[in-house]
Amino acid sequence: MASTSIVEIENMTFKRGERTIYNNVSFQIPRGKVTAIMGPSGIGKTTLLRLIGGQLRPDSGTICFEGQNIPELARSELYKVRHKMSMLFQSGALFTDMTVFDNVAFPIREHTKLPKEIIRTMVLMKLEAVGLRGAKDLMPSELSGGMARRAALARAIALDPELILYDEPFAGQDPISMGVIVRLIQSLNQALGLTSVVVSHDVQEVMSIADYIYVIANQQVIGQGTPEELRQQESPLVQQFLQGQADGPVPFHYPAAEYSSELLEYARS
Amino acid sequence: MISFFQKVGANSLDNLGSVGRATFMLIGALVSKPTPIKSFPLLMKQIYMVGFLSLIIVVVSGLFIGMVLGLQGYTILVDFGAESSLGPLVALSLLRELGPVVTGLLFAGRAGSALTAEIGLMKATEQLSSLEMMAIDPLKRIIAPRFWAGVISMPLLATIFSAVGIIGGYLVGVKWLGVDDGSFWSIMQAAVDLEDIWNGLIKSIVFALVVTWIALYKGYDSIPTSEGISRATTETVVHSSLAILGFDFVLTAIMFGA
């Protein structure tokens, strides 16, 4: 098992203040595959990526990346590990004071001493892969939302990472750029032989690209499997999520006092 | 009554906590082996953003404050027939007090608020996080060059402010109101010690440290929402202005008192 999974999370508990986000969860992310993590918004899917990336530390448990326990690494070791992973942020997080070209070149310039021409070639190759070679001289503010995310993707793969973490890659995209990004995630995963972790709640898109899916809710993994397996599962919570029903195990109403008594409160007093 | 003490206590703990976090931020940013080849262009860019772009407001304010000093000083001194002392009056008030203090206040408003907003927005748009994930320390990459740029720029701006102010006082006093040209400069030269210039410079360095530190910390520690950033920006201006005035009194007491 150890050789086939790139990230292994075991008995991990994470609390934010008093609130428990994850309660003793364990799962593996297989190498070379597209793994999706789904769940309703606000349950800490992005938090999970930050935990894997070492930006947050769990309260207990281990998060191993290629056998190294991320939370226990010293800063310099963590930075070394981060050379092998990269993250696509929801907002793209392009540096607004640089052109698209410089944005993609940034990690290469920071971490290598390659000559200018090679960096130029590398950047153009990455931009070509996401279809933005023509936009290399534009500033991030001149890009549409979908283009910005593709440019950020080019930057994320600039140093050929082994693991790429996608934070809500489909959120707020029109159908066309959604399709483009779905195709890109898939083709990059195959062409570059990397491992992708996609955090999302767009059921259709995720089902179409993921090799393996974890559904998270109530601080736990509530369902897992290949897309087909997941469709067969009987858990009402998983089915509510997959089919987008408004009410079910995840209630429509925020916890509140009883409706009639709250309405009558005035009348009584 | 108890709740009052509770509030005071909680507030002091909060403030102590942020002093600690600010100190950690600064240590994290500044303590490292120097990498001049990479840092120099970053520093130059920030000196341009923080220093050069504040130049116009500093020069214009300096000119007007110098001219007002010349005018006000003349109307009082002329009653005693002492208008030839206008030179030292203008020069000393600028070099000792107004140069560093007013430049500090302008710098807090112009550059400090911009730094806070910039870093707050970088935080909100996940740029700082993405640097982290690229294995680049945002403290060294973003905070450190801005800090040094502020510390280098502000004393220079304060010096320029005083120089332009003296020219303003000269224009009004000598060219307009007819104070004697020779005595304006020669009495000024006799009255101003090198110590006055040094003391003004030390003040402006202290203010620069304080303002830049506050501005960077407020941005770095801001809550990454539109409301959080606007509050952080306001706090930068308010806190740095108060800090400047407070430190000015302390420094003046040390330098000139007793």
Image (tube, coloured by chain):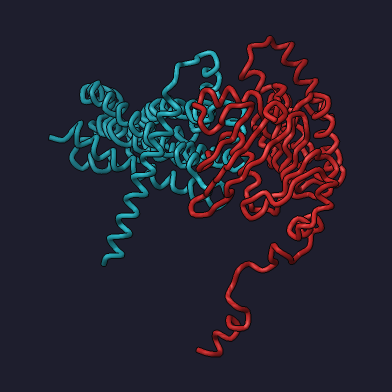
Q: Residue furthest front?
A: A1
Q: Position of residue B111 (x, y in %)?
A: 48, 36
Question: Which residue is found at the position 30% from the left and 27% from the top?
Answer: B202
- The residue drawn where x is 31% and y is 65% is B3
Q: Nearer the viewer, residue A183 or B68?
A: A183
Q: Identify the residue at horizontal 83%, vertical 51% (top origin).
A: A231
User: In the image, what residue occupies the spot 26% across and 27% down?
Assistant: B199
Q: Which residue sits furthest bottom? A: A268
Q: Does residue B160 appear left or right of residue A235 in this picture?
A: left
Label total for image:
0
Where does the N terminus of chain B fall, quadrant-wise?
bottom left
Could you say where residue B95 lies in the image, as x and y percent from the top left?
30, 30
Examine the image and state in which quarter residue B210 appears. Answer: top left
- Can residue B32 be seen here? The reply is yes
In the displayed structure, A127 sits above or below A34; it is above
The residue lying furthest to the left in this view is: B258
Instruction: Indicate the quadrant where residue B125 lies.
Output: top right
Colour in which chain A is drawn: red
Question: In this orientation, does residue B127 appear?
Answer: no
Placement of the C terminus of chain B among the 4 image quadrants: top left
Residue B24 appears at what percent x and percent y?
40, 34
> In front: A103, or B206?
A103
**Chain letter matching colour cyan:** B
Please tell me which residue lies in front, B198 or B219: B219
Q: Is residue A233 left or right of residue A158?
A: right
Residue closer to the observer: A224 or B174:
A224
Q: Position of residue A174 (x, y in %)?
A: 83, 47
